[in-house]
Amino acid sequence: MDAIARLRKSKLRKNLNFTFVTAFAAAGLAIFLMPFLYMIVSSLKTHSQMTAMNAPIWPATNPSFTLNGENAGSYTFQVMKNEQLTDLTINMSEYNGKAMTIYTVPLADGTKKNLAVVQGFTQYAIFMDPQNPSAAPILWQGPDGKGGYFKTLPIPWVFSPTWANFPHVWNLEFPGENGTYKLFPVSFMNTLFYAFTTTIGVLISCTLVAYGFSRFRFPGRDFWFVILISTIFLPGAVTIIPTFTFFFKIGWVGTWLPLIVPAFFANAYDTFMLRQFFMTLPRELDEAAMIDGAGPFRVLWSVIIPQSYAAIVAVTIFHVVWAWNDYFGPLIYLTTKQQYQPISVALARFNYRFGSDPQYIQAGALITLILPLVIFIIAQRFFVQGIVITGVEK
Amino acid sequence: MQYGRASLALARQPYIEECEMELLTHLPKKRTKTTSYWKMSPIARREYRNGILFLLPWFAGFLGFTLIPMLATLFFTFLDLKILDVLTTPKWVGLANYVTLFKDNQIWNARPNSSPGALWVTIRFGIIALPVGIFLPMGIALLMNSKWLKGSNFFRSMFYMPYIIPFVASIFLWGGLLNPASGWINKGLSAMGVPFDSLPGWGNDINWVYPTYVIMGLWGIGNAMLTMLAGIQGVPTDLYDASKVDGAGSWGAFWNVTFPMISPVIFYNLILSVVGLFQYFLVPLVVNQGTGAPGGASMFYNLYLYKTFFVNMNMSYGSTLAWVLFIVILITTVIMFSTARYWVYYASENP
């Protein structure tokens, strides 16, 4: 009996541990990813909700009601005007097609109801029931019938995402060098172009250099390899001033060239990764090809590359994400040519102009991050287990 | 192409970790005897030629975009080049730029609330940012390694995911959440009863600007987390068994087994963080528009350098700032490496 009780107890404890640790991780993750939720929710709000004090956290709007000929009657109410009872006549047909604001109205019987205001005055107002438009309008004179101003009543919020923010942001026109242009579509295409051209440069140059480092024995190879990797640690500041000045002198500042051309001269990251992968490939196939008379380019093209698709895909993915993120290079080289700027620079520019419209900023941020996010979701394996595919045991 | 790091870890390609790890751990130790080219066999000679041929794209890039610019920067530090488009012959000024730098208030001013110098900005930010940048990824990695965690693959992916978000977008996401007026954080704080006057002003508040940057950099921890996790998973299980036999609890096992065993990974992340810290400026550039607001608290060294060159067009002084930064980073790294053996445990050295 003791043994069973102990077993049960330990099982309970195990379950408790699982629940506790997993719940803890989930809570941490929720906090960590909170900005995503903020972005999605905020990008679907209206400007008036963003600035309203008592607005709910979810995307909502103030409902309004428009009469479409459901009620064409004429109603007379007795109201106090200049301390005299006066007749007030409301012709419902006059209000056809007008949007009426809906308020949460406290009625004389103590209940609250969402009613549309037909005509409001400082001490009383005429309301109608949007659920039942053909019914007669109601005269409201404050919660206790002694007069009240309808504008002090709370306005209800109804869940309603403002999808229109996205097309609005997407179609916004910004001033550029040669007249206005649509900021997001243009910069989105610019980034695609930037990512595409530099990926080609990186793939060509890094494959060649990685092949040189992995397949040929020559004195000084290890030395150069260390130099290659050390360039990662080099502060960019120490090379940027002459480089920028040089590009400025030859008239490349304000074009894509200073961003694209260096990509064709191999960088340490991608070269390293491809080299690590090439090192894992067996040399027998190279040698067989060489005996058949293949030169080094032929071996690279027909033997190495067909075996390296995984590494090439990985380099492509990483480079595209990197190019999407790149901010500083495009910022300095394309400051004066707004319509060439990629999306990261465009988003910062957008933020400076729409600082008081958080809903647009969040919609713009979503447009900016959607592509890398989709790439990540599709190619998760490459990112989280990127170490595995290089074939280096860890 | 890579100019500084967006956050302490952001804006880098994922496998850079591995790449740098290789440099730190596998430096070629024994030298192979080099034979002169002319004494080589024809086959070796051909292999040499072909190897160099394939390395040419990188050699050209290294010369053109790294080595020559570096030396040119050094040369500029001894000149007086004030404008971008030089028409006159530059004047040789010797060490004058260095003298200016060592007297520059923008770097040395120690008053924290009226335009503090870049040195103090870096130190004050580093005191908050470095511990977060090391211990948070370590904590998450430990959590991911917990045998009680269900769906650890999912959690690992999700904690990594923000790393690939363009950092400009992530700044605006966090910036929205931290907005003093409309952000959720301050709304939550006031709902909890924090009076309006004591709500933090985050990025615009001199007391809160560094925590704001740290929070905005949180999404860059993905890589550090992965390397720490790899380190933790690489600890041999028999060490834990041994510690259990010795009567260690889970805390004792962590402190006496896990921590020393992953200290090389921690050390390596620390080096990267320190190097990144010295070059930190992209976040202040975007968040506070590079103005140094509030009260000069965001005028980081690299931001000052950026403004010196790109706004004030002072090439020589910008170059001087750049070379001093380079030397400081070099010295710091060398000091860290040379003291590493006192506090980093390398398992292979003690067989």
Image: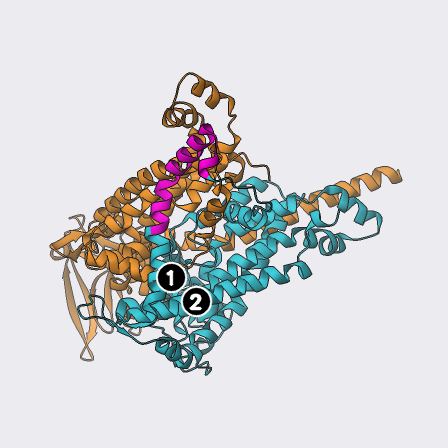
Chain colours: A orange, B cyan
Circle 1: residue type: Val
Label 2 near label 1: C-beta < 8 Å? yes
SS at mark 2 in the image = helix
Q: Tag on residue B325?
A: 2
Which span of residues is magenta-colored? Answer: B37-63
Q: Say few, some or many: other residues with alpha carbon within 10 Å of mark 2 (under 14 / 14 to 19 / 20 or more).
A: many
Could you tell me which residue is drawn at 33 percent across and 57 percent down? A328
Q: Is residue B50 magenta?
A: yes
Q: Say few, some or many: other residues with alpha carbon within 10 Å of mark 1 (under 14 / 14 to 19 / 20 or more).
A: many
Tell me the quarter of the picture where residue B267 sits: bottom right
Q: Position of residue B1 (x, y in %)?
A: 35, 52
Q: Nearer the viewer, residue A140 or B39?
A: B39
Check disc 1 and report the residue beneath it: A238
Chain of the residue on which disc 1 is drawn: A
Q: Position of residue A389 (x, y in %)?
A: 51, 34
Q: Is residue B187 visible?
A: no
